[in-house]
Image (tube, grey):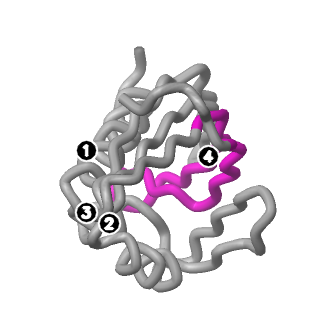
């Protein structure tokens, strides 16, 4: 596995771990300022600040995730990753919601060698199987 692919896999892993620990600052450091998230049934979420604002609404919830990388392709300073993602959200009330499905993420290599998420298409749907 080449260095850039390892870096992207590490970014995905860091994202999952930082989300689970509630480290929004770390998650924000993994995306570009002009990041765009595409979520079925919702308008595009544009920009790091919009993501940060949405994350604040989830501060009282526990979020756990599992991501299985299916494919990573690197083309110069751009790369995409197709993953199968499962996310479980537990609210203060104890209610749980689980979503799962595929995501397609686009990354761009920065001048300092870091990879950042620049676009993400999330195709998760409600999952009725037991939350993990």
Could you tell me residue 96's position as x and y percent? Answer: 42, 48
Residue at disc 3, secondary structure: helix
Whether the residues at callouts 3 and 2 have beta carbons within 8 Å, the answer is yes
Q: Give the alpha-carbon distance from disc 1 to disc 2, as whole Å.
A: 13 Å
The image shows residue 80, relative to residue 44, as above or below, that is: above
**Residue appearing at x 48%, y 52% in the figure:** 109
Which range of residues does the magenta coloring cover?
100-125
Q: Residues within 10 Å of mark 3 (few under 14, many from 20)?
A: some
From the image, tell me which residue sits under label 2.
Answer: 29
From the image, tell me which residue sits under label 3.
Answer: 26
Could you tell me residue 37's position as x and y percent? Answer: 64, 64
Residue at disc 2, secondary structure: loop
Quadrant holding the N terminus: top left
**Residue appearing at x 65%, y 34% in the figure:** 101
Mark 3 or mark 1: whose residue is earlier in sequence: 1
Discs 3/1, front: 1
Q: Nearer the viewer, residue 82 or 22?
A: 22
- The answer to which image quadrant residue 111 occupies is bottom left
Residue at disc 1, secondary structure: helix
Could you tell me residue 31's position as x and y percent? Answer: 45, 64
From the image, tell me which residue sits under label 1.
Answer: 17
Mark 3 or mark 4: whose residue is earlier in sequence: 3
Whether the residues at callouts 1 and 2 have beta carbons within 8 Å, the answer is no
Q: Nearer the viewer, residue 131 or 10?
A: 131
Q: Give the alpha-carbon distance from disc 3 to disc 1, as whole Å.
A: 10 Å
Q: Nearer the viewer, residue 15 or 87?
A: 87
Main SS of the magenta part reads strand
């Amino acid at each position: 596995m080449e260095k850039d692919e390892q870096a992207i896999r590490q970014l995905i892993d860091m994202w999952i771990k930082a989300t689970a620990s509630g480290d929004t600052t770390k998650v924000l450091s993994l995306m570009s300022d002009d990041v765009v998230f595409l979520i079925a049934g919702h308008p595009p979420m544009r920009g790091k600040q919009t993501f940060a604002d949405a994350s604040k609404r989830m501060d009282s919830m526990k979020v756990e995730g599992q991501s299985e990388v299916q494919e990573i392709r690197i083309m110069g300073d751009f790369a995409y990753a197709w993953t199968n993602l499962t996310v479980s959200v537990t609210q203060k009330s104890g209610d749980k919601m689980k979503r799962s499905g595929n995501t397609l993420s686009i990354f761009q290599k920065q001048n300092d060698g870091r990879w950042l998420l620049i676009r993400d298409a999330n195709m998760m749907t409600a999952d009725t199987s037991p939350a993990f």
